[in-house]
Image: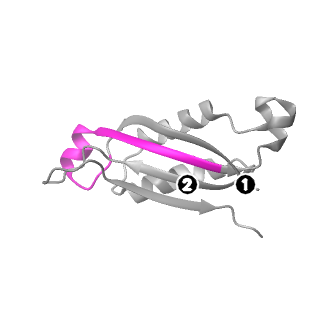
Amino acid sequence: MTDRIALRGIRATGFHGVYPDERRDGQDFVADVALELDLAPAALSDDVADTVHYGELAETVAAILSGDPVDLLETLAARIAVAALADERVDAVEVTVHKPQAPITVPFGDVAVTIRRERSTP
C-alpha cells in the first residue's frame, strides 16, 4: 500500500530559462508535488513528527523555484525531487513544474514538465 501527500500550485518567481530576458526579468513558476510514503505511523500517532510536514516542504519547493537559475524545467523538477527524497520516509515523488508565461509565440494554456523519481534500493 502506498499513501500520498500532494501539494498543488506552489508558486514563486524565478529567473529560469534559456533566453537572456527570462534570466533578467523573471517570471512565475508553479510546482505540483506528490509524495508516496507510508502514512500509517502518522495516522496512528496523530503527530506531525511522524509524517512529512507539508508546510515545510512547500517552503523548500518555493525556495528552489526562486533559487539558483537553470535553463530547463527538467533541471528544476529534478532539484525538487532530490529535496523531497532527502526525507528517508519518502519512497517516491512526482514533480510537475509549470511555466505559464513561457516564451511561446502561439496561444497556449500551460507548459509543464513532469518527472517521477523513486528511492534507490541498495
Identified by mark 1, the residue type is Thr
**Going 46% across and 36% down the picture, which residue do you hit?**
10
The residue positioned 54% from the left and 46% from the top of the image is: 33
The spot of residue 11 in percent (x, y) is 41, 35
Q: Secondary structure at mark 1?
A: loop
Residue 38, placed above or below residue 56: below
The span shown in magenta is 16-35
What separation in Å lies between label 1 and label 2 (alpha carbons)?
Answer: 13 Å
Query: Quick check: 43 above or below 23?
Result: above
The residue indicated by pointer 1 is 2
Question: Dot 2 surroundings within 10 Å: few (below 14), some, or many (20 or more)?
Answer: many
- The extreme front residue here reads 1
Residue 28 in the magenta stretch? The answer is yes
The residue where tag 2 is placed is: 94
- Which of the 4 image quadrants contains residue 6? top right
Count the numbered circles shown: 2
Type of amino acid under label 2: Glu
In front of the other: 15 or 41: 41
**Residue 122: image location, x then y, percent:** 78, 70
Colour theme: one colour
- Closer to viewer: mark 1 or mark 2: 1
In the shown orientation, is residue 36 left or right of residue 8? Answer: right
Coordinates of residue 16 in the picture (x, y in percent): 32, 48
Q: Observer-nearest residue: 25 or 61? A: 61
Q: Is residue 89 covered in magenta?
A: no
